[in-house]
Amino acid sequence: MNTMTSSTNSKTHRGEVYQRATEILELNDRGHYTVPTHGLYPFQWNWDSCLVAIGQQQLDESRAWTELNTLFDHQWDDGMVPHIIFHEHDDGYFPGPNVWGTGRRVPTTGITQPAVAGFAAALLYERATDKSLASNQARALLTRIDRWHEWFYRCRDPQNTGLVAVIHPWETGRDNSVDWDKALAAVPTADLQPYQRRDLEHADASHRPTMAQYDGYISLVQHFRSLAWNNEVLHDASPFQMVDPGFNAILIRSCSDIATLATQLGEMDIASRNRERAAAGLLAMESLWSDSHQQYVCFDRVAGQLVDSSSVAGLLATFADIPEQRMQKLALRIETLAASANYLVPSHDLADERYDGTRYWRGPVWLIINYMIANGLKRGGYDAIVESIEKDSLKLIDESGFAEYYDPMTGEPCGGSTFTWTAAMVMEFIKKPG
């Protein structure tokens, strides 16, 4: 086969993959919000929607803005944006609205998720072809996103350290990470009320968190519900307080991007506040650096110590404008992982005995994480590593379809299928053919 024919076939194949990705977005589109996948996740998830909107923009700019607006239409009065919005009744998911008991007219959970909305909104504006629409939509979202950022630093950084804490593993999106093992095991479960999981009806139990971990998750929910979801007290009252470098990197990046967007739109007060938040956060990130792990690690505020765990959270710090010397170290860590894994980027170090290649966040590859790590590395000029990450991501799609996550050694598809944000990230890696 000559080079021209090979190139044509490759473009045709990528075009077919892109088309399948768009079909998955359409399959999971509910008109004004998108579900991650049918069955396993039948509602609107916070950071899913923000990342999916990036892919949606390639198809319909107006629809992409609608995705973000729907999310922020359910922002709490105190500024928090919840991690799930229960738009419709569905008994197939646990814990549902009755377990959370947040008292919202449209039910929501009482915790949040990574603050990727600022990054997404700024990117939608930057890429917009309809600048009039983008200006109007971005200007309206700016105040809402700024309020959410303010909420984070007010309610999750009461000591003004520059870094925010999560009070539930679900807030990070990395539910069963090795990072939480010790802290989650210390969560009191003696008063746990009986419950019935539903996730195992839709996914392989060996791919999901354990029952012991679920006991911790639900105990925290029940504890926070007993405190009427008062965000002014939940941080200090929580037996789980974790400073996650990846979570903070996303927030810092969003603050920085919103500062740039606000400047472009003439909203100088919003720009100034978010620029200051980003600067303080970047300085504070240094406290999470581990020389022994050669990456950032989590800090347990309850225990008062760094967590001995080399998870992908520390690598996700590339998403923020960390110092070049740290970026170089993280690039080396990813190169080391590439030597032991067949697919980048595993969510945990394969050399750690706690690694599990198919169990959710204890090893599997997630394309949304690949996208954010690659985005940060590309800004730093690490094009070769970025190419490797994107190549591995698309190879997983070719071999295993649009799964929720993948085994970094075998490429086995795990979790849910026809997954929306996986499809959106593929659209980002390929870009619209034409």
Image: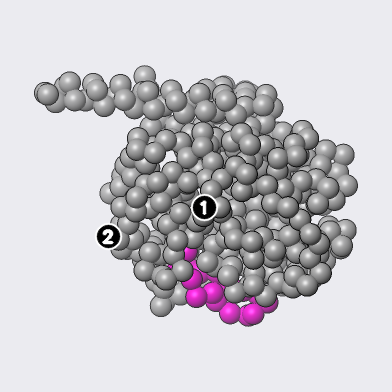
Tell me if residue 214 is in the magenta stretch.
no
Amino acid type shown at disc 1:
His
| Res 175 seen here | yes
Q: Which residues are magenta?
A: 296-312
| Res 321 seen here | no
Quarter residue 294 falls in: bottom left
The residue beneath circle 2 is: 339
- The residue depicted at 71 percent of the width and 72 percent of the height is 187
Amino acid type shown at disc 2:
Ala
Where does the image place residue 386, in percent across and percent down from the top left? 34, 47
Location of the N terminus (image quadrant): top left
- The residue depicted at 39 percent of the width and 39 percent of the height is 400
Q: Which mark is residue 302?
A: none
Count of numbered circles in the view:
2
Up/down of 370 relative to 184, above or below: above
- For label 1, count other residues whose C-alpha is less than 10 Å away and answer few (under 14), some (14-19) or many (20+): many
Magenta stretch, main secondary structure class: loop
Where does the image place residue 225, in percent across and percent down from the top left? 84, 59
Left or right? Give the position of 385 relative to 99. left
- The residue depicted at 40 percent of the width and 65 percent of the height is 349
Where does the image place residue 79, in percent across and percent down from the top left? 78, 50
Where does the image place residue 126, in percent across and percent down from the top left? 52, 34
The residue beneath circle 1 is: 207
Location of the C terminus (image quadrant): top left
